[in-house]
Amino acid sequence: MPDDHRLPDHVYDNIETMTRLRLAEERALPGEQRKVEALTSWVGRPQTLYALAGIVLVWIAYNVWAHRWHPAAELDAPPFFILQGVVGVYAALITTMILVTQNRQSRDARRNAHLDLQVNILAEQRTAKIVALLEELRRDLPNVRDRVDPLAEALQEPIPAHAVSDALDATLGAQTAEGNEHARSELDEKH
């Protein structure tokens, strides 16, 4: 990588730390979970879709041919009850594997969201402290005119996370109620 595009060392340190954490999380997974997720990943490839579609088409074509021209060789007469059963079992297994994988990913996403919230709260508290220190320094410097800055005073106070959460809930609740009312009025107009 050219030196003029080199990122600061702390960026590489952060990338390395995040990579190590992710690898540690994956190593900590139970063996069964890793196997299910590996199988889910393998089944989720386009090649698997093409193979499945090919197998179903060959199965149908063979059995239609056998039904018409060679009934003794027929494995599954139309409407292909055996194929329907196999596809149903396959769908149930795939659905369960996907749910197992998604459940683990949802737990990880919730944990990461909580971590993000904690880091953001800490950053907000640090920012408030920095603003307070700058304001104190501004007041103490003899060559800087002392003045009242309402925004700087407001920024010195850390904002309680629960207050932001309550305001967000109230806003989203109002928007949801407004959206529901709008949808109801559109339905009323159509009828």
Image: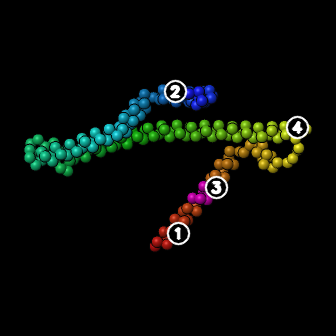
Q: Which residue is mark 4?
A: 141
Which residue is painted at 65% across and 48% down in the image?
165
Tell me which label, 1 or 2, sits earlier in the chain.
2
Q: Secondary structure at mark 2?
A: helix
Measured in 3D between alpha carbons, the distance from the residue under mark 2 to the one under mark 4, in whole angstroms, is 50 Å
Disc with the residue nearer the chain's start (3 vs 2): 2
According to the image, label 1 marks what residue?
185
Evaluate if marks 2 and 4 touch, with contact meaning CB atoms under 8 Å apart.
no
Quarter of the image where one finds residue 15? top right
In which quadrant of the rendered view does residue 83 lie?
top left
The answer to whether residue 8 is above or below residue 61 is above
Q: Which residue is mark 2?
A: 24
Q: Local crowd at mark 3 within 10 Å, few (<14), some, or many (≥20)?
A: few
Alpha-carbon distance for marks 3 and 1?
Answer: 22 Å
Q: Residue 153: percent from the left, percent from the top?
A: 80, 46
Q: Is residue 170 above or below residue 98?
A: below
Residue 136 in the image: state x and y as whole percent. Answer: 84, 39
Badge nearest the viewer, 3 or 2: 2
Residue under numbered circle 3: 170
* Amino acid identity at mark 4: Leu
Which residue appears at 82% of the width and 41% of the height? 135
Q: Does residue 158 show up? A: yes
* Image spot of residue 96 (x, y percent): 38, 40
Mark 4 or 1, closer to the camera: 4
